């Protein structure tokens, strides 16, 4: 791919990131993507390039936005952190204190901290939900509120891959004086002050020409990439009765990445999976968190809580959904043995299906984001993203 297909800017000292971004197209089969880095409050990398729509060949433009899958979780959890900073709740409060119906089926003692740390056992939703029902917050709240935990809360941990966003949204609705959903709260309290181009639930009338088209994978294709995924995860994902499959496939339409191109799926709030935006917005938001949150008025106690690794559940850190040991913190993933994505354990972020990733590194005072439309097969550490991240750290180290 010729250099003119890659556009954008890099600050002096960050030229290596642009070189790697171009290399992704030449040697790592990149289709369309963007990458952005905020360092010490300044935008030092802002790159985009490639193909936005593989059917038409239309290019990825400066204002192109894309579905980012579970990278959405980190953005949504910023809204929860903001609400905490505003004193709407404490992380050690019981969820049922604000949401009495949540106490059903043995959840009366579950704390907000346990829920956000993926320790509540609420990965799957047993009540079948249609796509139409997902757009009705009261219907979703009723279904998830009565859900029975898959284990005694606090005993184990397991990735709440889709459900976490709905629990976060209902927590916001129950504690926010304006009773906003998480998507509305995010727009008002995070996106608008920071001038972000990011949406949890795409606004009606949004220009379709700005959207990147996801080139996703079929579930069966993972069988040809088992070396890139935990075998236990693949085996469970393909078993419709397993906790893993039930976590990601209610309704079933959510279990296939290509379905996220559907306008009807993009228009509802799935705060753990269907955020739409670009790397510029994600990196700017994480940069705000990494440098103290002054624009958003975040309290130091909130940021300290995000930077601390969650206490391990009583049965250890083996993830009951992903089948690997991992580490969480209040809606975020923390660096751990198989995914040392930052310079210290104070960092936090979330990767998304296919390869996208956004995170904050308070030690480096950096916000990083990578967004693409061609899905890879890695849970994290996609070679395209990893090369950009490592190049960024190499540039910072050399300054």
Image (cartoon, helix red, strand yellow):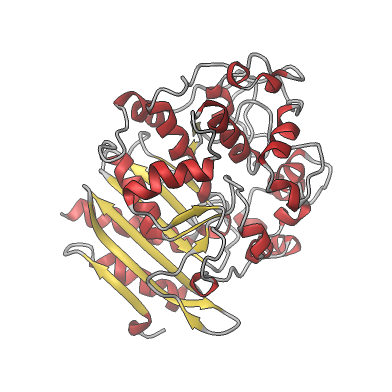
Is 6 rendered above or below residue 169? below
Q: Is residue 103 left or right of residue 280?
A: right
- Image position of 308 (left or right of 155): left
Q: Is residue 177 left or right of residue 251?
A: left
Q: In the image, what residue occupies the spot 70% across and 54% down?
A: 254
Compared with residue 135, is residue 345 higher up or lower down, i.e. above or below? above
Please state if 349 lies on the left or on the right of 272 as rendered. left
The foreground one among 203 and 75 is 203
Residue 23 % position (x, y): 38, 74
Q: Residue at x 61, y 59 (%)?
A: 266
The location of residue 5, given as percent across then percent down, is 38, 82
Residue 232 vertical position relative to residue 95 in the rendered view, above or below = below
Residue 55 appears in which quarter of the rendering?
Answer: bottom right
**Picture residue at 37% right of the left edge, 38% below the top:** 347
Which residue is at the front of the view, 71 or 101? 101
- Of 203 and 263, which appears nearest the observer? 203
Residue 276 placement (x, y as % from top left): 51, 58
Q: Above or below — where is 197 with respect to 124? A: below
| Residue 325 appears anywhere in the view | no
Image quarter for residue 146?
top right
Q: Quadrant of the C terminus?
A: bottom left
């Amino acid at each position: 791919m010729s250099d003119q297909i890659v556009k954008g800017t890099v600050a002096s000292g960050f030229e290596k990131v642009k070189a790697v971004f171009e290399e992704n197209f030449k040697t790592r089969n990149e289709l369309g993507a963007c990458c952005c880095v905020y360092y010490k409050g300044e935008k030092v990398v802002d790159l985009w390039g490639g193909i936005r729509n593989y059917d038409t060949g239309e290019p990825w433009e400066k204002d192109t936005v894309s579905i980012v899958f579970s990278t959405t979780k980190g953005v949504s959890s910023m809204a929860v952190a903001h609400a905490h900073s505003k004193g709407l709740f404490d992380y050690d409060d019981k969820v049922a204190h604000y949401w009495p119906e949540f106490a059903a089926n043995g959840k009366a003692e579950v704390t907000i901290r346990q829920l956000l740390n993926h320790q509540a056992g609420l990965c799957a939703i047993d009540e079948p939900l249609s796509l139409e029902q997902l757009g009705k917050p009261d219907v979703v709240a009723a279904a998830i509120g009565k859900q029975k935990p898959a284990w005694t809360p606090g005993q184990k941990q397991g990735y709440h891959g889709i459900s976490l966003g709905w629990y976060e949204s209902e927590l916001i609705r129950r504690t926010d004086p304006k009773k906003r959903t998480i998507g509305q709260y995010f727009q008002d309290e995070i996106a608008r002050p920071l001038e972000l181009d990011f949406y949890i639930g795409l606004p009606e009338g949004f220009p379709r020409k700005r959207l990147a088209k996801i080139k996703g994978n079929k579930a069966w294709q993972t069988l040809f990439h088992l070396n890139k995924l935990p075998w236990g995860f693949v085996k469970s994902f393909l078993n419709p009765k397993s906790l893993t499959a039930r976590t990601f496939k209610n309704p079933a339409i959510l279990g296939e990445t290509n379905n996220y191109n559907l306008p009807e799926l993009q228009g509802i709030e799935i705060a753990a999976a269907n955020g739409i935006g670009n790397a510029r917005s994600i990196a700017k938001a994480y940069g705000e968190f990494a440098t103290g949150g002054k624009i958003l008025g975040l309290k130091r106690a909130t940021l300290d809580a995000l930077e601390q690794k969650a206490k391990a559940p009583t049965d250890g850190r083996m993830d009951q959904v992903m089948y690997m040991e991992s580490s969480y913190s209040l809606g975020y993933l923390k660096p751990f043995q198989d995914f040392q994505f930052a310079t210290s354990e104070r960092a936090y972020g979330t990767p998304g299906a296919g390869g996208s990733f956004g995170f904050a590194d308070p030690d480096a005072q950096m916000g990083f984001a990578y967004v693409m439309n061609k899905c890879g097969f890695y849970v994290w550490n996609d070679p395209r993203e990893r090369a950009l991240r490592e190049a960024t750290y190499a540039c910072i180290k050399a300054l």
